[in-house]
Amino acid sequence: MLSRKVVEIRAGRRPSERAQISSCAALPDVPVLPGTLLLMDLGAQENPVDLHEMTRVVLSDPGATIQILRMVGRERSFGEERPSRIEDCISVLGVQSCIEAVFRRTASRAIDKTEIMKAWSHAREIAEACRLMAEEAPERVGPNEAYLTGLLHELGSLPTILGWEPAFAVSSDPVLSGLNMAEEWFLPQCVVDYFSELGSLKATNVLSKMVHRAHEVTGASSKGSPSDPRQESQASASGKA
């Protein structure tokens, strides 16, 4: 079930914004690093497959994570019971199907690989910081949800990061773009909630504050990442004071 915030944002969209959502399902495959493909291929040859290790490999690569979650999203048979944990996705879809999903596009060109490696490294750093913070207060948000949110916090900036053609533009606003993509790809609710709260400006969101804090703790730049508009407004007001 969609959160109230998602419904509010949907209701407030202009017709042109709503029309863009349907294009998300047809967006290009997200590239996966060659090293990830190699480790997954090697892991698939083991008998039995080490599900824990396969999950670790997938979650180290935002592209592999998104590709598998997108495949789950396309499976209409799951209905509201779509698995949201990567280990569950691999178990339900099967290792071979997951490998086929991630092998659709590899970060092969030198320029692509350099930019993607930077973005993917940043995503992992923020994801790990989010998980550590969640482990200190698991009653607020689970470590798995925190990690996944941190890993995909730049989802709305993927079209820019990956240099997609203008025809694949979802929205010029990375927050709205991230929300559209998360909804259309049926990504886990924690990712949808993260972007819906960023766009609503209403309730305090544990996830968005955690991602913001993760950038502060790691000293990582948030350039290119959707920012919490409330924090930007507060910073602007402080600067004018």
Image: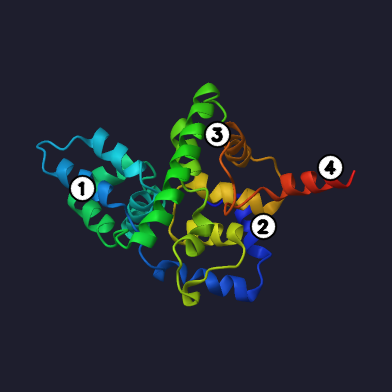
Q: Earlier in the sequence, mark 4 or mark 1?
A: 1
Q: In the picture, which quadrant includes the C terminus?
A: top right
**Residue at 53%, 58% in the rendered image:** 156
Q: CA distance from mark 3 to mark 2?
A: 33 Å
Check disc 3: other Cα within 10 Å, few if <14, some if 14-19, many if 20+.
Answer: few
Residue 81: percent from left, percent from top: 38, 48
Residue underneath mark 2: 8
What label does residue 238 carry, if any?
A: 4
What label does residue 218 carry, if any?
A: 3
**Residue at 57%, 47% in the rendered image:** 194
Residue 82: percent from left, percent from top: 37, 49
Residue 79 visible, this orientation: no
Q: Earlier in the sequence, mark 3 or mark 2?
A: 2
Q: CA distance from mark 3 to mark 1?
A: 29 Å
Q: CA distance from mark 2 to mark 1?
A: 43 Å
Closer to the eye: label 2 or 4: 4
Q: CA distance from mark 4 to mark 1?
A: 49 Å
Q: Secondary structure at mark 4?
A: helix
What label does residue 241 carry, if any?
A: none
Q: Amino acid at mark 2?
A: Glu
Residue underneath mark 1: 38
